[in-house]
Image (spheres, grey):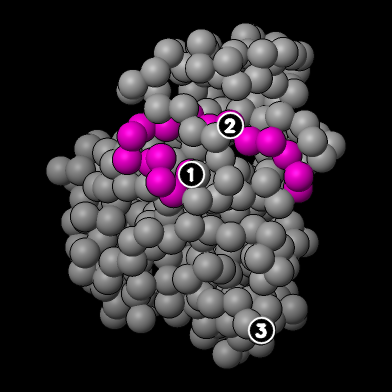
Amino acid sequence: MGQAWGFGKHGGPEVQEFFNRPDPVPGTGEVLVRVDVAGVNPLDHLLRSGLVEGLDGGRPFPRVLGMEAAGTVLALGENVDEFEVGDAVFGFALTGGGTYAETTVLSAPNTARIPAGLSASVAATLPVAGSTAVDALDQLGLPAGATVLVNGVGGGVGLAVAGLAVARGLRVVGTGSTAKREHAETVGVRFIDYAAEDVAAAAHELVPGGFDGIVDLVGGTSLRRVAPLARNPRDVIAVGDASVPELGGRFVERRLDRESLWRAARLALDGVLAPVITAVHPLADAPAALATVENGHTPGKVVIKVT
């Protein structure tokens, strides 16, 4: 039996609970992993709220929160020959097994070995936040010297996008709340405080001719406010708002396979992709970890150290 943090039905934070569960049994194409570190993402509370479907693996309630983790392989399911017991790995919990737990099952095709020299904490940020940043910028395909606006730069994905964009030689402007300024400027972002400034006016002053690309991490009204700042509507990439084609833009095309995970890990190992981890919580403090992400108050990436 191991402890897990999850939810007994769809809803708000009030449906969350700690519970004990037997170690999951890895099915065909799955690996059982002892979780060392779990990443915390906005996707987690969206799944809990029932706003995102198809990522629960058909599992009954209670379900475990969390979609990304790094840990150690404990057992292999059938038809898994690319890993061995004892391997240090990281990946997506696309099986619905969750990651805010002592053990979980990961889908082998969506799992990769952690390269030597990369910490479990950094590896745990790569499946969702890190690889999303890589995918969004690859999709834009901007050359060095181009300008990119990161709308909602202060969170885990936003800072990863910004840091990677700077490393690629792009000129980066980012929007965020006052509390996010310091971290954004540290990675090389020209920051616009959306609470204190007119975003469109400030952006136009910084980049009068419009942006070569926009990566939006906010959606909704905010997306519609910044989309016209792109020189070409097609160069607006939204990470969380699937309605972006209505504005002429594109939704991010996610690559979730092992090759993409390994690429993100190599970029992290080389210092090109540098996740900004600002809070590390024990599993017992998982409610607070998720609350800070759900409330949007914490800059950078939040992780849960399970073991």
Residue 283, compared with residue 229, is above or below; it is: below
Q: Write the residue at 82% across / 40% down.
A: 144
Which quadrant holds residue 189?
Answer: top right
In the rendered view, does 174 fall on the left or right side of 135? left
Circle 1 packing at 10 Å, graded few (<14), some (14-19), many (20+), is many
Residue receiving disc 3: 116
Q: Secondary structure at mark 1?
A: helix
Q: Quadrant of residue 280?
A: bottom left
Check the image and report above or below for 18 versus 194. Answer: below
Question: Seen from this angle, which residue lies furthest left?
Answer: 14
- Residue 178: tell me if it is visible: yes
176 in magenta: yes
- Between 150 and 7, the one lying in front of the other is 150
Mark 2 surroundings: few (<14), some (14-19) or many (≥20) residues within 10 A: many
Of pointers 3 and 1, the one earlier in the residue sequence: 3
Farthest residue, direction bottom = 86
Q: Nearer the viewer, mark 3 or mark 2?
A: 2
Three-letter amino acid code at the position of disc 3:
Ala
Q: Which residues are magenta?
A: 168-184
Image-based side of 44 in relation to 14, left or right? right
* Residue receiving disc 2: 173
Establish if 237 lies above or below 138: above
167 magenta-colored = no
Residue 32 visible = no
Q: Looking at this view, is 9 or 291 the one in front? A: 291
**Number of the label disc, if any, that sits on residue 238:** none
Numbered badge on residue 184: 1
Q: Earlier in the sequence, mark 3 or mark 2?
A: 3
Check the picture and name the quadrant holding the N terminus: bottom left
Q: Residues within 10 Å of mark 3 (few under 14, many from 20)?
A: few
Q: Residue at x 49, y 33 (%)?
A: 191
User: Upstream in the sequence, badge 1 or badge 2?
Assistant: 2
